[in-house]
C-alpha cells in the first residue's frame, strides 16, 4: 500500500478526488442551482454517469459469475479482476445517486419511511444488495479456507441474476415513466442489459490489457482474444435491440416519431450517431475478424470505442426526452436555477436547455477518480503475487 501511494497516478487521482469533494460540498451549501440542471432538465450528467457505471459494473460481474455458473474454465482466470472492477464501478454508481440529491442529509428517511413506489428506493435497495454480493464474492474468491471454491460457485448463482437485475431496475426507472415518450418502452430492460454486457466486457478487456503491461496481473493474449470474440457478439445483440426500438418508434402511428426526430436529427443527434458509428459499427467490423482479435492494440481501440459509444447512448437516452417539456401555454415551469431565483418573468419557461457546469464536471471527475482509487487499492491487496504471475 505504501508503494501504491507514491505512484504518480495515485497522487493525481487523490487530488482530483479531493477537488471533486470540495465542489460537492459547495453544491450542498448552494443547492443544485449551481449545476446546469433546472426544473425543465431535472436530471443531467450525474444520472448519465450513474446509468453508465451501473452498466459497467453489471457487465463485469456477469462475466465473472457466468464463468462459475456455466463452468467456463478459461474465464475463471479473470474472475477476480472482473469482480474487483465490478465492485469499484458499483461504488461509483451509488455515489452518483447521492451527489444528485440536493438534500443528502435526508437520505435516512428512506429507511425511516420507505416509499415502495419510489424508483430511488428500488435503486438504493438493489445497489446495496449488489455491493454486498460483490464483497461476499471477493471474500470467498480470496479466501484460503477449505471449501471456499464451493462457496464461490454458490455465490455466483446469486450474483448472475442480481447483476442482470441491477441494470434492469435502472432501466425500469425510465421505462415506466409513461409521461416521457423516449423512455417509455417495453424493451428498455433488455436494451440496458445488452449495453451493460458490451460496455462492461469492453472495460474489463481494457483493464486486463493495462494490467498486463504493468505486470500487476497476467492474462494470456488468447484469452483476451476470446473475450474480444464474445464482445463482438454482445455488440451485435446491443445493435439488434437498438434497431428494434428505432423501428418501433419510426413506424407510422407508433407515436415515437417526434422523439426519433430529435434523437436522429435534433440536439442529441451527435450522441446518437456517435454511438451507432463509433460504438457499434466500427468495433463490430474490427472484432468480427479473427485476425483482428489477435491484435491487442486493435482490440483495445475497439473496446474503447464501445465504452465511448455506450456513454453517448446514456446521453441521448436521458436528454432527448427533456427537450420538449410536458407543458403548454403560460406560465410554464419555474426553472429553479440560480438566475431564475431573482424572480420576475425570467423565472418561467416553456422550454429549457442543459449544459453541465464546471462544478458538475469537477464532481464527476472526483467521483470517477475515487472509483479508480478503490480499484487500485483492491487490486493491490487482493490479487496475490501468484495470480499476478
Image (cartoon, grey):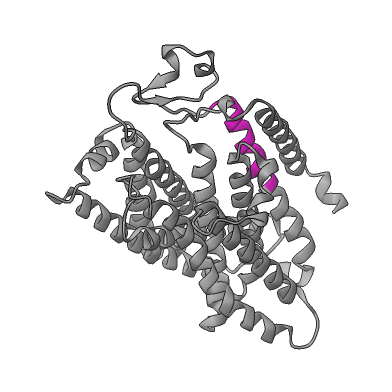
Q: Name, please, the residue furthest toward the front.
A: 113
Q: In the image, 237: left or right of 306?
A: left
Q: In the image, 37: left or right of 284?
A: right
In the foreground, 302 or 180: 180
Q: What residue lies at 49% left-to-right and 67% top-to-bottom?
A: 164
Q: What residue lies at 83% left-to-right and 44% top-to-bottom?
A: 6
60 part of magenta stretch: no
**Residue 82 pos. (x, y %):** 61, 65
Q: In the image, 256: left or right of 139?
A: left
Residue 389 in view here:
no
**For residue 359, which quarter of the picture?**
top right
In the foreground, 176 or 282: 176
Relative to 300, is 81 above or below?
below
In the foreground, 119 or 317: 119
Residue 138 in view here:
yes
Q: The C terminus appears in which quarter of the rendering?
A: bottom right
In the foreground, 208 or 28: 28
Relative to 34, is 123 above or below?
below
**Residue 93 pos. (x, y %):** 59, 51
Relative to 70, is 323 above or below?
above
Dominant SS in magenta: helix
Q: What residue lies at 53% left-to-right and 59% top-to-bottom?
A: 116
The stretch in magenta equals 357-370
**Residue 103 pos. (x, y %):** 64, 38
**Residue 310 pos. (x, y %):** 43, 49
Amino acid at each position: 500500500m505504501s508503494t501504491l501511494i507514491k505512484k504518480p497516478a495515485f497522487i493525481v487521482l487523490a487530488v482530483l478526488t479531493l477537488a471533486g469533494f470540495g465542489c460537492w460540498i459547495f453544491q450542498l451549501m448552494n443547492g443544485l442551482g449551481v449545476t446546469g440542471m433546472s426544473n425543465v432538465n431535472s436530471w443531467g450528467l450525474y444520472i448519465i454517469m450513474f446509468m453508465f457505471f451501473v452498466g459497467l459494473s453489471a457487465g463485469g460481474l456477469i462475466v465473472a459469475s457466468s464463468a462459475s455458473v456455466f463452468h467456463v474454465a478459461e474465464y475463471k482466470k479473470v474472475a477476480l479482476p472482473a469482480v474487483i472492477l465490478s465492485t469499484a464501478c458499483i461504488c461509483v454508481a451509488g455515489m452518483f445517486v447521492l451527489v444528485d440529491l440536493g438534500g443528502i442529509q435526508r437520505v435516512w428517511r428512506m429507511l425511516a419511511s420507505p416509499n415502495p413506489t419510489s424508483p430511488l428506493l428500488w435503486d438504493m435497495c438493489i445497489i446495496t444488495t449488489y455491493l454486498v454480493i460483490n464483497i461476499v464474492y471477493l471474500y470467498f474468491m480470496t479466501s484460503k479456507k477449505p471449501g471456499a471454491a464451493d462457496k464461490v460457485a454458490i455465490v455466483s448463482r446469486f450474483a448472475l441474476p442480481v447483476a442482470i437485475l441491477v441494470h434492469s431496475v435502472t432501466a425500469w426507472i425510465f421505462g415506466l415513466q409513461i409521461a416521457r415518450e423516449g423512455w417509455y418502452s417495453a424493451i428498455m430492460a433488455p436494451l440496458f442489459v445488452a449495453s451493460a454486457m458490451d460496455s462492461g466486457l469492453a472495460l474489463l478487456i481494457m483493464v486486463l490489457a493495462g494490467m498486463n503491461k504493468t505486470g500487476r496481473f497476467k492474462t494470456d493474449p488468447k484469452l483476451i482474444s476470446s473475450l474480444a470474440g464474445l464482445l463482438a457478439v454482445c455488440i451485435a445483440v446491443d445493435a439488434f435491440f437498438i434497431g428494434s426500438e428505432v423501428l418501433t418508434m419510426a413506424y407510422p402511428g407508433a407515436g415515437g416519431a417526434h422523439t426519433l426526430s430529435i434523437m436522429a436529427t435534433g440536439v442529441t443527434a451527435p450522441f446518437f450517431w456517435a454511438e451507432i458509428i463509433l460504438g457499434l459499427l466500427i468495433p463490430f467490423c474490427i472484432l468480427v475478424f479473427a485476425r483482428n482479435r489477435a491484435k491487442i492494440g486493435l482490440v483495445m481501440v475497439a473496446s474503447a470505442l464501445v465504452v465511448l459509444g455506450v456513454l453517448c447512448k446514456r446521453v441521448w437516452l436521458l436528454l432527448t426526452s427533456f427537450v420538449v417539456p410536458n407543458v403548454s401555454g403560460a406560465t410554464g415551469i419555474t426553472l429553479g436555477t440560480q438566475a431564475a431565483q431573482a424572480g420576475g418573468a425570467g423565472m418561467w419557461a416553456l422550454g429549457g436547455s442543459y449544459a453541465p457546469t464546471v462544478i458538475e464536471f469537477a464532481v464527476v471527475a472526483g467521483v470517477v477518480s475515487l472509483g479508480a482509487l478503490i480499484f487500485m487499492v483492491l487490486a493491490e491487496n487482493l490479487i496475490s503475487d501468484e495470480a499476478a504471475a
